[in-house]
Amino acid sequence: MKAALLPPVLFTALLSACAAPRGDYPSLLPRPIEKISLAEPVRPVQVATPDAALDGKIAAANGAVAAATRAFEAAVARARPLVRAAAGKAEGSEPWLNAQVALAELDVARTTIDTPLADLERLAIDHAAAEAPPYPALDAALAKATDAANTQRTTIATLGENLR
């Protein structure tokens, strides 16, 4: 008898769960505030206006970078034969000492590029701090000077490795 009562009681209990109570309940639809987009607005890209004073500073720094690069290349031309002559020689030997002196002179020649590089970096920092739009000539000059400085450091390291 208990088994016969179970399906109608179970059916009644399940059917009562479908009945909705009457009352004022909030809607589950999105509210107006939830329909607002939180995406960043699209802002127009600002175009840099020509600046004669900045262009003059960039040109001066570019000239200093070119002069420093030429001086470094001349020092490399003097150091390279000395390093080749010292390759495989004992430390402390005359050719090895001459190569070490040439590498030291090369390192001094490399430092001349640091000043115009620092000047360009300062110009870029000041330009960014003023919240000005990107200045392509400044960015290109800074990239070129940075590449030249990195190339010089790599050249010195390569020549130094040839002595070992």
Image: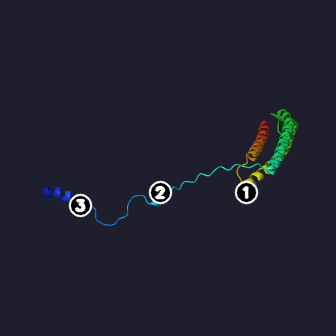
> Which numbered mark, 2 or 3, is in the foreground of this view?
2
- Which mark, by number, is residue 16? 3
Q: Residue sitting at 23 percent across and 60 percent down?
A: 16
Q: Which residue is mark 2?
A: 35
- N-terminal of the pair, mark 1 or mark 2, is 2
Give the Cα distance between marks 1 and 2: 37 Å
Residue under label 1, please give it. 130
> On the rendered structure, is 67 left or right of 50?
right
Crowd class of label 3 (few under 14; some 14 to 19; many from 20; radius 10 Å)? few
Residue 139 seen anywhere in this rendered image of the structure: yes
Residue 94: quadrant of the picture:
top right
Type of the residue with mark 1: Ala
Question: In terms of sequence position, does the residue under pointer 2 or pointer 3 come before the other?
Answer: 3
Provide residue 162's location: percent of width, then percent of height: 78, 36
Kind of residue at badge 2: Lys
Residue occupying image coordinates x 79% and y 50%: 54
Is the C-beta separation of discs 1 and 2 under 8 Å?
Answer: no
Q: Residues within 10 Å of mark 1 (few under 14, many from 20)?
A: few
Rendered position, 31 above or below 159: below
State the image coordinates of residue 31 (x, y, percent, origin top left).
44, 60
Is residue 114 in view?
Answer: no
Q: How many marks?
A: 3
Query: Quadrant where the N terminus lies?
Result: bottom left
Question: Disc 2 and disc 3: Cα gap in Å?
Answer: 36 Å
Q: Nearer the viewer, mark 1 or mark 3?
A: 1
Q: Position of residue 66 (x, y in %)?
A: 83, 41
